[in-house]
Image (cartoon, grey):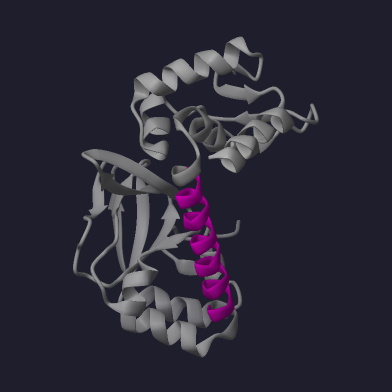
Amino acid sequence: MATPPRAETLARIPLFRSLSPADVAKLDRQCAWKRAAAGHWLLDYQDASDDVFFVVAGAVRVIIQSGGREVLLREIKAGEFFGELAAIDHQPRSSGIMAVLDVTIGRMPASVFRSAVHEHPDVCDQLLTLLAGQIRMLANRVHEFATLDVPHRIAAELLRLSRPDPKEPGRAIVSPPPIHAEIAARVSTRREAVARQLNTLERAGLIERRRGAIVLTDVDSLRRQVDEAADTG
């Protein structure tokens, strides 16, 4: 019987897909490994450390404070990582990180991370692609906050969270469905506003709420509404 791969290894991280097993094992030994329960804060905003964290199991959220409310920027799942900006520029953390599931993470010193980036072209290319994607994502979020009202920001977030329904073209599924407070944190509003807008979308026939999912029944129509609101915002 084959020995199952151990949990505490960077072999689970696509960033290191081009490295040999020996190279991965060398990096594994240079990481400090930690498990944390859901709800535990892994990093605070403005933390002065510059290590990089690799999520090999579980998931975490990137959260900032805005106007006394928490704003959820994005979710980082198993196979992904965070902290690379501080490792590059050695500036304080730009956001806080909280575990949303029980997590296993590897904490890599900035010097080790930078050496891996310099020594392995594929790692460097993947990092550049990731950073470009983050810049585009943040630019889109800024555009939405500048041009869309709360109802259309909620619609845009549902579209972003959804995946195409494999059985019915033109429809999409958000599963598991986020609670109202989570959607509110993503679009910087209050959960009461989210509840009202979901009811409005449901009455309009644009969403259906099922056990374990929100179904977007007409993706093109919902996206068109968001685009038109952005154009007139």
Q: Is residue 139 magenta?
A: yes
Q: Is residue 90 above or below residue 194?
A: below
Q: Nearer the viewer, residue 211 or 186?
A: 186
The verdict on residue 34 being magenta is no
Q: Residue at x 54, y 85 (%)?
A: 120
Left or right: 80 with respect to 114? Answer: right
Q: Position of residue 157 (x, y in %)?
A: 52, 37
Farthest residue toward the top?
A: 203
Q: Does residue 46 appear to the left or right of 222 in the view shown?
A: left
Dominant SS of magenta comes to helix
Vertically, is 61 above or below 1? above
Q: What x and y, as percent, mark residue 48?
A: 19, 69
Residue at the front extreme, as displayed? 232
**Image height check: is 49 above or below 148?**
below
Stretch in magenta: 124-144
Q: Is residue 182 left or right of residue 148?
A: left
* Quarter the N terminus occupies: bottom right
Tally of numbered discs: 0
- Asked which quadrant contains residue 192, the reply is top left
